[in-house]
Amino acid sequence: MKICVLSGDGIGPEITAEAVRVLQALDRPFEMEEALLGGAAVDATGDPYPEATRKLARAADAVLLGAVGGPQWDALPREKRPERGLLGIRKDLNLFANLRPAILYPELANASTLKPEIVAGLDILIVRELTGDIYFGQPRGVREENGERVGFNTMVYSESEIRRIGHVAFQAAQKRNKRVCSVDKMNVLECTQLWRDVMIEIARDYPDVELSHMLVDNAAMQLVKAPRQFDVMVTGNMFGDILSDEASMLTGSIGMLPSASLDDKNKGLYEPSHGSAPDIAGQGVANPLATILSAAMMLRYTFGLEEDAARVENAVKQVLAQGYRTGDIYERGTRKVGTREMGDAVLAALAA
Ligand code: IPM
Ligand code: MG
């Protein structure tokens, strides 16, 4: 059970350290090795996804990632930016299936900006395609045309790419409430008409799952209007990027949400859904729970350690019930703690 640990930039090292402690506390023979990704890698090697990291990540069964990026790297040429490291490792490891659960913990119902009766009991899984679409499509660039600059990107999906992410969504739904909502923009974009057609074809293999379709603009609206109508949402890379940020905020704090990015053989990269939060980096105040919950997803999806995964998730629920809160989820009457103390509390709950 080899785990490549990429703590990355900003708050990445602080939150990753807590997730590593949780994994170590489980007493399983994990082999963990650290490497550089993102801005930290650019500073050390000039490359956001250096060869040494590539080797280690390819050889590992799973990758635990903190976060990448920060303002100090924003002026670099595109191929040297930290984000390119993240896109590079996703593509290199063929991590096409991005699972982003949005779950509202009852203790945090007040953290949401939506009325509690709209979000109570929320449990959505967004399945985002992660290695195709306009993110990777060619041609792309900015060129000179008729004396002015013209920018262009290409939205492209092959039917096999759509099919494999579709299967992931339907299989996930079978383990949940058996509903898949596929999100597209078929009224305008041919590429997403194909997306819809392929989803309808796949649905025949899953008679126990109900498939519905929604245009992305309506989906964005429905997510804030009546989010509990959704079980599994499946969509392309760009729509998934946007809708998953929106869904995360229904729960009040993006600091609580884990994610898994999987290939077709259970290898996975696990990272919190939030970014590197440079504004609070190094202060020991970041919320490590999303990263700890990402480690739980790793236990479940890559290592098949369902019981350990549930133990970690229950420990997180327990510390919330005990009133521990980092600044992002703090409210009066609860106990404000830092990153390390939150990690300590989870470890104590695990040991209890
Ligand atoms: C995400 C992020 C990334 C993405 C960025 C950092 C490249 O927003 O994981 O959602 O757009 O995929
Ligand atoms: Mg995003």
Image (tube, helix red, strand yellow):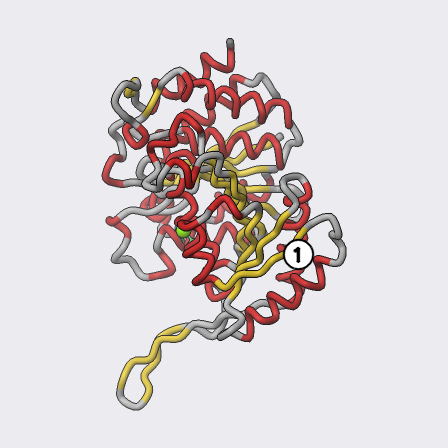
Q: Which residue shows up at 30% across the image and 40% down it?
A: 277
Q: Residue furthest front?
A: 117
Q: Which residue shows up at 64% across the image and 56% down it?
A: 211
Q: Is residue 34 left or right of residue 326?
A: right
Q: Quadrant of residue 234?
A: bottom right
Q: Quadrant of residue 131?
A: bottom right
Front residue of 228 and 154: 228
Front residue of 52 and 207: 207
Answer few, some or many: residues within 10 Å of disc 1's Cα (few below 14, many 20 plus, some between 14 and 19).
some
Mark 1, ligand 1, within 8 Å: the answer is: no
Q: Position of residue 154 (x, y in %)?
A: 47, 72
The residue pinned by badge 1 equals 164
Front residue of 228 and 290: 228
Q: Position of residue 134 (x, y in %)?
A: 47, 66
Identify the amino acid type marked 1. Answer: Arg
Q: Relative to 140, say whether 313 is above or below.
A: above
Q: Position of residue 351 (x, y in %)?
A: 51, 11
Q: Position of residue 139 (x, y in %)?
A: 47, 75
